[in-house]
Image (spheres, helix red, strand yellow):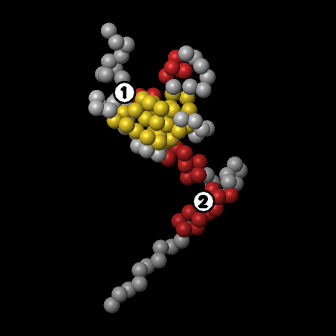
Amino acid sequence: MPFSTPAATTAATAFKIDDFVLYRDPQMFWAGKPGHTVVCRVTYAERYTNGTIRYTLTPVTGGLICNAQGDYMRLLPPLDAMRDIDTAPLHTADGMTAAAMAWLAQQHATANQRPELPTQRD
């Protein structure tokens, strides 16, 4: 009898090229080795005739991971990566880059302007 059945496992998500994912190397994880979980970018996906998809991943720290299974990957949504910029107060610059501050100032300025009415046409 297998350890898990399709009904007992979560359906794998199909990831797209350029998605950022969290990948856990199952062999390293079960062996108790450090560094088993890394942030990666999906660089290639191949669908096999039996319906499985295998991915090539590029870890953000460098290197290459080939034949990664989607079951060991989780999507890292852009919303999570940008939350600190979206929710940062405009009156403090602690821990923010100059580019982030400039972007926030621009968003704040345009959000507080009155919308202009379109020119009337005869």
Secondary structure beneath disc 2? helix
Q: Nearer the viewer, residue 46 or 96?
A: 46
Q: Is residue 95 above or below residue 25?
A: below
Expressed as whole percent of the image width and height from the top left, the position of residue 51 reads 30, 31
Residue 113: which disc? none
Q: Is residue 85 visible?
A: yes
Expressed as whole percent of the image width and height from the top left, the position of residue 2 reads 34, 12
Mark 1 Cα within 10 Å, few/some/many (few <14, many 20+)? few
Residue 104: which disc? 2
Q: What residue is shown at x 45% (from left), y 30% (from top)?
A: 68
Residue 10: which disc? 1
Of the two numbered discs 1 and 2 in the rendering, the one whose residue sits closer to the viewer? 1
Secondary structure beneath disc 1? loop
Question: Between disc 1 and disc 2, whose residue precedes?
Answer: 1
Query: Which quadrant: the N terminus?
Result: top left
User: Viewed as shown, does residue 91 lie left or right of 63?
Assistant: right
Q: What residue is shown at x 30% (from left), y 22% (from top)?
A: 7
| Outermost residue to the bottom | 122
User: Viewed as shown, does residue 21 lie left or right of 11?
Assistant: right
Expressed as whole percent of the image width and height from the top left, the position of residue 121 reads 35, 87
Q: Nearer the viewer, residue 46 or 104?
A: 46
Mark 2 Cα within 10 Å, few/some/many (few <14, many 20+)? some
| Outermost residue to the top | 1
Q: Amino acid at mark 1?
A: Thr
Displayed quadrant of residue 91: bottom right
Expressed as whole percent of the image width and height from the top left, the position of residue 81 reads 55, 45
Q: Is residue 19 visible?
A: no
